[in-house]
């Protein structure tokens, strides 16, 4: 019967990894050199204190170090830095040993009351049975009540020569100050990931199990720096591993992490602002039963890696990131698709969402809102939102080779420079009254509208060369207005975003207000006619078609040679040399800037019988041109039209005949 029992015991499952590979010397403790080295020096020099306090996170080696310290204290070869492992005391306290009656471990979580402290105090005065010291290892010391600590205070302060105390706790602040002040405090820390990873690989080699390099970071991350937790995770994976060992797929499924393929899909979709793919990833997460909070944590971890790669291009070679080679290339590629502000902003949004996940009743909704905030930086008015938009613009400019940068800052339009024209009166087609010759000097030109010409101040007037104004119409060809072809090339203005050959009718209509402003500087009569009675209707190659509302307006436009001023304005604003064709279209709607022709309106407007002209224009046309009037900026308005020089013609009849307009009282609009 007894033989059968022994056989059954021999086939039992082995102990857990964290028990089988518990360190037996300070040299085997990993990641705690700041604690183990001073303790070894103190043991070797026989300068051991009567009480110690070991604190730190769980699973970092506090209790194990307390046991090693107890073995070293009771070793027959003491004082010694590490226990010899040969004497009876070392064998009793070794891994898997029966233990020693002189080394007592107490769990304060269940023995932290005042009665337990009194019982310990009574037993402590007895001498050790077979060892040099009686050692009390009090685990979870923060669970001892204040009354229990007070009961132990006198014993800890002045213990017998054979007594040593070692307190181990994860919360040293809960140990009362009178106890802490009487101990040597050694803080333990979490084990660095690289050190822990190397240790896990050694254990896998000892266990003859293959561990894929891509699965190792998942085990280290699941352990969170705790050796015991990491060994527990690895033990679980080793138990479920097949002949191929611990694979990445096995680690992802058992540990519940998000697969790298899903994270790659989400990151690429964020970089491309592809909302459809992003929300498709969210649907996959929910449908596969994964925890939305875990997905957010994994996404934050990936964003952290990308932030480091973007800030430190050689982070992988420096060891800042511990990732496999194929994943390293993927991180570099993904980081190049983001700007620094975009990555940090996305990481902040995910981090804030993780706080909201606590106790959330609709985790999917929170996950989708988090993704929406990352996708739409335009709705974020914070500094990070503006920086994210700036990153996107800079990346697009870099992709386009910097071409839009030139168009983004157009050069100011240069005014056309015309050759000087001899300023002297010349005969015209029909006899008119003699008027003084114009002065060939720069004259102030009003910048306000014709409706407010009578009230324009001299402070708003601009100076233009006389060559830019129309000289009197002469019968000799040499005295005619220079054509656009004779003008030097002008710098493109705001309308130069497109190339000259790529201009469309929509571009001309969009820039038509600027063209009219340039025509107003050249000749006010042509500006009044075009702004009130004309509209751009077509562009065929190098021919621009302008529709006027009636035949009288078209004939006046042609007879006054206003198309030459339109050509000069087009050359100044667009840098083009086009032929102007004037047609009659009663349905033309002056002042519109839509892309559709006026004839496309399903309900064309009826022919206009007249145009309302302000009183100031009527007065300007009625007054004769005198030398004193030339000092007034409005005087140029009467000089542009030779017909007005006939004093026997009424201005109202002229406006009605030439423009189809009727004069209204300007005071009605006040």
Image (spheres, rainbow, N blue to C red):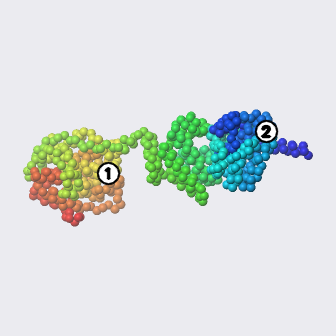
Q: Quadrant of the C terminus?
A: bottom left
Q: Quadrant of residue 593?
A: bottom left
Q: Which of marks 1 and 2 is in front?
A: 2
Q: Where is residue 273 in the image (x, y as percent from the top left)?
A: 50, 48
84 and 184: which is toward the camera:
184
Per the rendering, the mark at residue 89 is: 2
Residue, x 52% and y 49% (percent of image)? 348
Q: Looking at the image, can residue 32 be seen?
A: no
- Helix, strand or loop for disc 2: helix
Whether residue 506 is visible here, answered yes or no, is yes
Secondary structure beneath disc 1? helix
Of 417 and 68, which appears nearest the observer? 68
The residue shown at (63%, 50%) is: 177
Give how far across and how far down residue 219 sits, in percent: 66, 43
- Relative to 611, is 324 above or below? above
Q: Say whether disc 1 or disc 2 marks the residue closer to the N-terminus.
A: 2
Tell whether 510 sits left or right of 186: left
Q: Position of residue 539 (x, y in %)?
A: 32, 48
Within 10 angstroms of label 2, few (less than 14), some, or many (20 or more) residues? many
Is 167 displayed left or right of 461 in the figure? Answer: right
Q: Which mark is residue 509?
A: 1
As measured in the structure, the alpha-carbon distance from the residue carrying label 1 to the one carrying label 2 is 100 Å
């Amino acid at each position: 019967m007894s033989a059968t029992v022994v056989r059954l015991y021999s086939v039992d499952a082995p102990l857990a990894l964290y028990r089988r590979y518990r360190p037996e010397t300070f040299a085997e403790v990993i990641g705690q050199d700041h604690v183990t080295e001073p303790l070894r020096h103190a043991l070797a020099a026989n300068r051991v204190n009567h009480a110690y306090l070991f604190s730190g996170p769980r699973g970092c080696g506090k209790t194990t170090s307390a046991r090693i310290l107890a073995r070293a204290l009771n070793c027959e070869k003491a004082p010694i830095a590490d226990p010899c492992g040969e004497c009876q005391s070392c064998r009793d306290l070794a891994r898997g040993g029966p233990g020693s009656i002189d080394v007592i471990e107490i769990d304060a979580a269940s023995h932290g009351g005042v009665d337990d402290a009194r019982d310990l105090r009574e037993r402590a005065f007895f001498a050790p049975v077979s060892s040099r010291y009686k050692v009390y290892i009090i685990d979870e010391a923060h669970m001892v009540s204040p009354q229990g600590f007070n009961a132990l205070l006198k014993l800890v302060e002045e213990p017998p020569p054979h007594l040593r105390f070692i307190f181990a706790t994860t919360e040293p602040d809960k140990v009362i100050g009178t106890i802490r002040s009487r101990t040597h405090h050694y803080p333990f820390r979490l084990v660095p990931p690289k050190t822990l990873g190397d240790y896990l690989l050694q254990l896998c080699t000892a266990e003859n199990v293959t561990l894929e390099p891509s699965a190792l970071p998942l085990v280290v991350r699941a352990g969170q720096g705790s050796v015991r937790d990491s060994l527990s995770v690895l033990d679980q994976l080793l138990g479920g591993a097949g002949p191929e060992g611990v694979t990445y797929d096995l680690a992802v499924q058992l540990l519940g992490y998000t697969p790298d393929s899903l994270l790659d899909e989400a990151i690429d979709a964020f970089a491309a602002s592809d909302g459809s793919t992003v929300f498709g990833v969210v649907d996959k997460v929910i449908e596969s039963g994964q925890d939305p909070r875990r997905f957010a944590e994994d996404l934050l971890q990936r964003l952290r890696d990308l932030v480091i790669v973007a800030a430190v291009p050689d982070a992988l070679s420096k060891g800042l990131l511990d990732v496999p080679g194929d994943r390293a290339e993927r991180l570099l590629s993904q980081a190049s698709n983001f700007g620094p502000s975009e990555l940090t902003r996305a990481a902040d949004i995910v981090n804030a969402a993780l706080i909201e996940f606590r106790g959330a009743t609709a985790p999917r909704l929170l996950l989708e809102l988090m993704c929406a905030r990352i996708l739409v930086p335009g709705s974020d008015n914070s500094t990070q939102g503006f920086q994210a938009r700036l990153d996107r613009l800079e990346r697009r400019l870099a992709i386009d080779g910097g071409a839009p940068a030139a168009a983004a800052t157009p050069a100011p339009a240069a005014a056309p420079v015309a050759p000087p024209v001899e300023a002297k009166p010349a005969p015209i087609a029909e006899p008119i009254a003699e008027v003084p010759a114009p002065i060939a000097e720069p004259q102030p030109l009003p910048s306000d509208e014709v409706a407010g010409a009578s009230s324009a101040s001299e402070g708003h007037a601009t100076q233009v060369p006389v060559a830019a104004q129309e000289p009197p119409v002469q019968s000799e060809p040499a005295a005619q207005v220079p054509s656009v072809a004779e003008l030097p090339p002008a710098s493109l203005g705001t309308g130069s975003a497109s190339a000259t050959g790529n201009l469309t009718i929509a571009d001309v209509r969009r820039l038509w207000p600027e063209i009219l402003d340039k025509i107003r500087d050249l000749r006010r009569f042509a500006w009044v006619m075009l702004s009130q009675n004309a509209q751009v209707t077509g562009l065929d190659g190098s021919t621009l078609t302008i529709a006027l509302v009636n035949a009288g307006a078209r004939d006046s436009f042609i007879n006054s040679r206003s198309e030459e001023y339109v050509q000069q304005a087009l050359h100044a604003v667009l840098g083009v040399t086009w032929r102007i064709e004037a047609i009659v279209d009663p349905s033309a709607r002056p002042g519109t800037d839509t892309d559709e022709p006026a004839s496309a309106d399903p309900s064309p407007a009826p022919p206009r019988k007249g145009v309302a002209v302000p009183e100031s224009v009527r007065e300007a046309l009625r007054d004769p041109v005198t030398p004193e009037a030339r000092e007034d900026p409005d005087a140029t308005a009467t000089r542009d039209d030779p017909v007005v020089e006939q004093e026997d013609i009424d201005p109202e009849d002229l406006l009605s005949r030439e423009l189809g307009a009727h004069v209204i009282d300007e005071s009605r609009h006040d």
